[in-house]
Image (spheres, grey):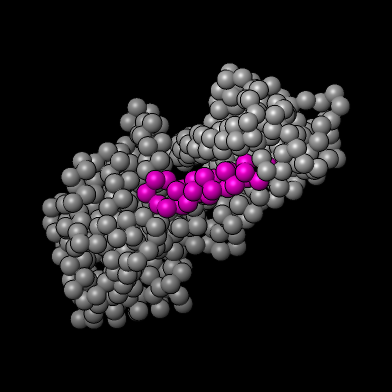
């Protein structure tokens, strides 16, 4: 059974239909890229999946539950939706203490994840002084703190330097190799092509294509060319 | 085609306990400087205000002379700044989630939004209670110092002073919870804080002036009554007594403020708290 299941999802904001009958699955042990042009409905879909936005119809479940009904959600799902979503006056360590308390996670995990994301030396600095890349790393640290089975990330490579992008790629590949499920939205198609096993491409809130990267690029085209071709055909 | 999946109900016992949610909110509160800054403001403004009132006592347009019960009440009771800043603290606890875009992480950790609201209200009450204790301790020391410096005997009984202390704590705690509700209903932190000051410094006076019989039921006035002030004697809000109308007794004022907090929380839970986090 797929870890993540989206079925007939519809969400309208006034006259705008952000998500329009979207359905797809994400399997365990894979990294799945969630791609689409700006305004395609990616972030709205992720927010519905995470219980932050209520759909007009359809369901979005993780391990068979809607997010709001997941037992111990932070132990099942780690999510990073916005790198700016931290109080600027709080230190990174305090932020992780709060997250650990919410997740009932072992406090020793705080040092582990700080080391993992390379923020151990900045742990006692206020987040307001962090670069975007450091905030992304802190977001990943909060997501990984409770050792979840699923990672859901929205543009996690934004602000990361080349070394950080490589580190992120290795992290996601390693996470999936251990049986974890990763759904990651990104605009960086070249990077996605190196990281993901399969992709879900949407445009105007509708599914355009879903499948292994190898299948989509079987004609000898790269992922970037396949993406543009598919979204162009969909918008006709 | 994949099978349809229906959400499965989760036993309530697997939710995070409310006490842990309150601890989370208190940890959030104590891990930034804003709460300490507001407490510092209370600790500066309260003795300054008490000193000004004490120096004006017995003079024209000032409080009654310090050897009278009325004069001593005017400088020791009331807790004005603790009450106002308790509301502001509560506002920042809830509206700060939207100002700093932290609501996403909060609701990812605890998807039950009404329980988050309840925990925030409890944290606002705890923070407000701290403000009440701090303000009363300071005003008591300063007020008694002025009284004894003039060689006057304290004419207010120890039991009354203790009641006022409890009233400072209860009043500021309930206003802290009300502040959380206000911040949940008005997500704009700046608008909510301006609204709090407008209400306590201006609007409550206007309403109390227009509808004199309604004065005891105005929230700031009721909280000031808890903190020991007779009707019309609060530093802010409607001034002057009204024939046949007196401040609410302790239990009634407590019930009124608790009812306002509860009613506001129910409205927020049915409206703004449910909104999409986009």
The quarter of the picture where residue A76 lies is: top left
Q: Is residue B47 magenta?
A: yes
Please state the horizontal and vertical placement of residue A54, each as a whole percent of the image.
Answer: 48, 49
Q: Nearer the viewer, residue B257 or B172?
A: B172
Name the residue located 34 percent from the left edge and 66 percent from the top edge: A129
In the rendered image, the vertical position of residue A66 relative to residue B221, given as above or below: below
Name the residue located 37 percent from the left edge and 43 percent from the top edge: B27
Q: Is residue A177 left or right of residue B172?
A: left
Please state the horizontal and vertical placement of residue B187, each as a whole percent of the image.
Answer: 56, 52
Please state the horizontal and vertical placement of residue B130, each as a whole percent of the image.
Answer: 48, 36
In the rendered image, the vertical position of residue B235 relative to residue A192, given as above or below: above
The quarter of the picture where residue A196 lies is: bottom left
Main SS, magenta residues: helix
Q: Range of the magenta residues?
A: B29-53
Please state the horizontal and vertical placement of residue B153, each as a whole percent of the image.
Answer: 63, 25
Q: Residue extending furthest front?
A: B151
Q: Nearer the viewer, residue A206 or B213?
A: B213
Q: Is residue A16 magenta?
A: no
In the rendered image, the vertical position of residue B179 relative to residue B103, given as above or below: above
Q: Is residue A126 left or right of residue B183?
A: left
Any part of residue B121 in sight: no
Name the residue located 54 percent from the left edge and 48 percent from the top edge: B44
Name the residue located 75 percent from the left edge and 34 percent from the top edge: B64
């Amino acid at each position: 059974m797929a870890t993540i299941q989206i079925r007939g999802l519809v969400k309208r904001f006034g006259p705008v239909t952000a998500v329009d009958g979207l359905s797809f699955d994400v399997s365990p042990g894979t990294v799945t890229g969630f791609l689409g042009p700006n305004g395609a409905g990616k972030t709205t879909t992720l927010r519905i999946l995470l219980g932050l936005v209520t759909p007009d119809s359809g369901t979005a479940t993780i391990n068979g539950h809607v997010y709001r009904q997941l037992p111990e959600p932070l132990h099942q799902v780690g999510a990073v939706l916005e790198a700016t979503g931290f109080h600027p006056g709080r230190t990174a360590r305090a932020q992780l203490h709060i997250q650990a308390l919410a997740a009932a996670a072992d406090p020793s995990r705080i040092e582990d994840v700080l080391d993992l994301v390379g923020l151990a030396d900045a742990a006692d600095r206020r987040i307001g002084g962090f670069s975007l890349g450091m905030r992304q790393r802190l977001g990943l640290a909060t997501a990984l703190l409770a050792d979840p089975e699923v990672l859901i990330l929205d543009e996690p490579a934004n602000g990361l330097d080349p070394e950080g992008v490589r580190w992120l790629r290795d992290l996601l590949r390693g996470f999936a190799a251990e049986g974890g499920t990763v759904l990651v939205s990104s605009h960086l198609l070249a990077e996605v092509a190196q990281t993901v096993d399969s992709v879900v491409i949407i445009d105007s809130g509708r599914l355009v294509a879903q499948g292994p990267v190898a299948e989509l690029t079987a004609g000898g085209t790269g992922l970037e060319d396949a993406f543009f071709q598919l979204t162009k055909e969909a918008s006709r | 085609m994949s099978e349809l999946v229906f959400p499965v109900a989760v036993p309530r016992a697997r939710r995070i306990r409310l006490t842990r949610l309150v601890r989370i909110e208190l940890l959030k509160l104590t891990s930034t400087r804003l709460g300490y800054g507001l407490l510092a403001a209370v600790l500066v403004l309260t003795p300054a205000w008490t000193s000004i009132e004490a120096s004006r006592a017995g003079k024209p347009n000032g409080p009654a002379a310090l050897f009278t019960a009325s004069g001593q009440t005017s400088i020791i009771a009331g807790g004005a700044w603790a009450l106002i800043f308790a509301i502001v603290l509560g506002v920042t606890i809830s509206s700060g989630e939207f100002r700093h875009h932290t609501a996403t992480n909060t609701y990812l950790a605890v998807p039950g939004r009404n329980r988050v609201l309840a925990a925030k209200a409890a944290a606002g009450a705890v923070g407000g209670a701290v403000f009440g204790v701090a303000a009363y301790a300071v005003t008591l020391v300063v007020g008694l110092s002025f009284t004894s410096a003039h060689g006057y005997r304290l004419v207010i009984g120890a039991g009354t002073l203790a009641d006022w202390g409890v009233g400072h704590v209860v009043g500021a705690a309930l206003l802290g919870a009300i502040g959380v509700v206000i911040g949940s209903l008005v997500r704009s932190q700046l608008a909510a804080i301006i609204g709090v000051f407008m209400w306590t410094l201006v609007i409550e006076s206007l309403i109390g002036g227009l509808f004199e019989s309604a004065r005891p039921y105005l929230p700031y006035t009721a909280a000031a009554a808890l903190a020991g002030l007779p009707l019309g004697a609060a530093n802010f809000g409607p001034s002057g007594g009204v024939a046949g109308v007196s401040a609410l007794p302790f239990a009634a004022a407590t019930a009124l403020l608790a009812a306002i907090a509860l009613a506001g929380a129910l409205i927020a839970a049915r409206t703004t708290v449910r909104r999409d986090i986009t």
